[in-house]
Amino acid sequence: MTITLTIIFGWLLVTTIVGIMAGRNRVFSMEEYFVAGRSFGLVLFYTTAAAEIYSSFAFLGLAGWAYSRGISIVYALAYGSIAYGIYFFLGPRINRLGKTMNYVSQPDFLEDRYDSKFLGVLVAMVGVIFIIPYLQLQIMGSGMIVQLASGGAISWQTAVIISFIAAVIFVYISGLRGIGWTNFLQAIIMLFGMVSVGFLVSRHYFGGVQSMFETLHQLKPTHLTLPDTAGNGIFWYTSTALLSGLGFWMWPHIFMATYSAKSEKVVRRNATILPLYQLAMVPVIITGFAVAAKAGLDPAFGAKIAKPDQAMFVALLDSMPAWVVGLLGAGGLAASISTSSALILTAANLTARNILQKGFMPHMEDIQVAKVGRLLVPVFTAIAVAFAFLAPSMLVSLLIVGYSGITQFFPGVVLGVFTKKPTKAGVISGIIVGLAALFFFQFGGVKTPLNLQPGFVGLILNFIVVLVVSSFTKNVEPSRLERFEKALSMQEGN
């Protein structure tokens, strides 16, 4: 275990130093701290986006779900395909508007587009609320990796504290630029770990992927069909894939990252090459299936897996040399910290910029917003860590809850970018109705029709309400719409 932990914590130390150094000799400002001065080129934006997208969910949650529930996990492959197609058209426009209108957060756009401070504050508050379970997911993942890699010698709570002290240090000092440079390193080791792990485990236990699938089909035939072992059928699969695909770019931290690209051409090129990361998810899913097959053959092995999200690491510790486990563990920890650091910074941004400055303290200067945002970085980290300690949950479940809330921004964002029709009243009403439906089905003990994802039902109602209410309420002033049209019609790449 000494070799494994040395590699994992050595990597953590290196990335922390790189994150700190990235912020040196930079003039501190709101734009620099939150969107890195809108300066990220093709490579840095690519690794930043990839590392923020592919998190503990991609490294541990995928394998855990494949192990415990079955084939329905491939919804993750479907929603990525949907999401990148949308981003090719939406992302460059977000970048262009951000640069032209000086936006540094997602609510900046919605407040300005619909001329509503209330909408901006509402979206910021909802964003912070649903960032917490996503951040909790990363915290749980990082703690689990170190705990398992140490053979239980280090508790996951201790591992979480160590990992997130490191994240807070470089986020506090360097902002998004520090996140970008650490993500450059994180993306490399994440990609190595995700690609190699599935084939290593399947080969060790079964001699190859084909033999593994044949064994799993014999032992658990429902594991590879819909409905699968967990009872998730085609309607659950379709609605979850659509919900996640449509909501992919509604996450405030990814919206903010889009502002950081130096041009919309960078964004569009990334929309075409980011899907390559989807291929790296396949080996992780295969690992989950391999562990399910191994546990079916060897109940004693299955007894070692206390929680589904531990499945991949239990198999690695059982089958791989310590140095391999260390590298893969560093990749998993990198996945957790890269996404969590962006989420922490975004929650601080939303609170300082849109809740305080735009909502309650309009006399705050931009430099004060940046300073308050910096002070909030350790605060939000502490809140998320407390939630992780008090209310742990399965990683995939946490992510789906987050998506269900964040996707309610989709009608207001997409209709606001591509059409003139939605009104302030329509968008606000839609978000409220969508969230109400989500909470009613998710936490009210009421099943959705056809076992649809609760957030997807909320999104359908959201769209209906936006269109209906917008049909009889007043739109923004024509001059405001003309300003947006002018910005969107500007020459690409400037």
Image: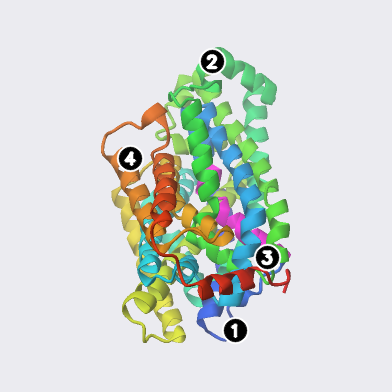
- Percent coordinates x, y for residue 472 in the rendering: 39, 57
In space, the residues marked 3 and 4 are separated at their CA atoms by: 38 Å
- Residue type at mark 2 is Pro
Asked if residue 34 shows in the view, the reply is yes
Please say if the residues under marks 2 and 1 sit with CB atoms less than 8 Å apart: no
Q: x and y percent of residue 19 in the render?
A: 57, 70
In whole angstroms, how far apart are the C-alphas of marks 2 and 1?
58 Å
Q: Quadrant of the C terminus?
A: bottom right
Q: Which residue is mark 4?
A: 442
Q: Amino acid at mark 3?
A: Leu
Q: Residue furthest left?
A: 444
Name the residue nearer the viewer: 355 or 426: 426
- Residue 129 location in percent, x, y? 35, 57
Q: Residue at x 39, y 44 (%)?
A: 461
How far apart are the two marked residues, 2 and 3, measured between alpha carbons?
44 Å
Q: Which residues are magenta?
A: 42-60
Element on which disc 2 rests: helix
Mark 4 burial class by Cα count in 10 Å: few <14, some 14-19, many 20+: some
Badge number at residue 26: 1
Q: 99 and 206: which one is in front?
A: 99
In the image, which disc is placed on residue 44?
3
Q: For marks 2 and 4, give the CA distance.
A: 30 Å
With 76 as the anchor, is 116 left or right in this view?
left
Residue 53 magenta-highlighted = yes
- Return the disc, 2 or 4, that comes first in the chain's sequence: 2
Amino acid type assigned to the residue bearing label 4 in the image: Gln
- Cα separation, mark 3 vs mark 1, equals 17 Å
Tag 3, which secondary structure? helix
User: Which residue in the protein does label 2 denote?
Assistant: 221
Which residue does the image show at 33% across and 81% down from the upper left?
A: 361
The residue depicted at 42 percent of the width and 65 percent of the height is: 347
